[in-house]
Image (spheres, helix red, strand yellow):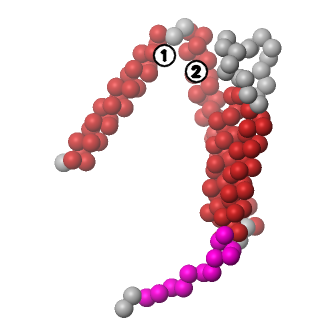
Amino acid sequence: MTLRFIRAILILAALALGWYGLSQLWAMPRADQLSIIFWLAGGLIVHDALFAPACIALGYAAKRVLPQRWWPPALLAVTASLVVLILSLPVLLPRSPDKTPDNATILDRPYGVSVVIALTVIWLLAVSLILARRRRPAAASTQRE
């Protein structure tokens, strides 16, 4: 009974938030609506046509090349790297000179350097996990009596 109640509350909250989002979208100018639809559709197409097959191919290749003990740290590092890269695309992609933001403080940092630092930290952590797993002796299987 409790789980059904929680599910019902979550479904109602999701429906209310969806309705609010659609009402906000409906109130926007037509050009903004089309832009949002374009970006949502483009995101789905890019994900299904590029990112998903690339991840599958990379995972398949890594499974054949990397030792089994390296898979978890490598998987975490690749996943975190993809998240950092995807989230940083809006500030990393070049902009035309006429498309400057209205607020000059929005793009006021060297985001490329920040992304490189974040990726370096991610991969250094992955390598340190791999090295720590290599140095740690394999756990002996103990049976309970």
* Secondary structure category for the residue under label 2: helix
Q: Which residue is mark 1?
A: 25
Picture quarter containing residue 37? Answer: top right
* Secondary structure category for the residue under label 1: helix
Which segment is the magenta one? 132-143
Q: Left of 141 or right of it: where is 58?
A: right
From the top left corner, tell me how far across and down residue 129 is, in percent.
66, 64
Mark 1 Cα-neighbour bin, 10 Å: few <14, some 14–19, many ≥20: some
Quarter that holds the C terminus: bottom left
Q: Magenta segment: does it hold 71?
A: no
Q: Residue at x 44, y 19 (%)?
A: 22
Q: Outermost residue toward the bottom?
A: 145
Residue 92 visible in the snapshot: no
From the top left corner, tell me how far across and down residue 141 is, in percent.
51, 85
Q: Which residue is mark 2?
A: 36
Nearest the viewer among 119 and 22 is: 119
Above-or-below relation of 77 to 104:
below
N-terminal-most mark, 2 or 1 = 1
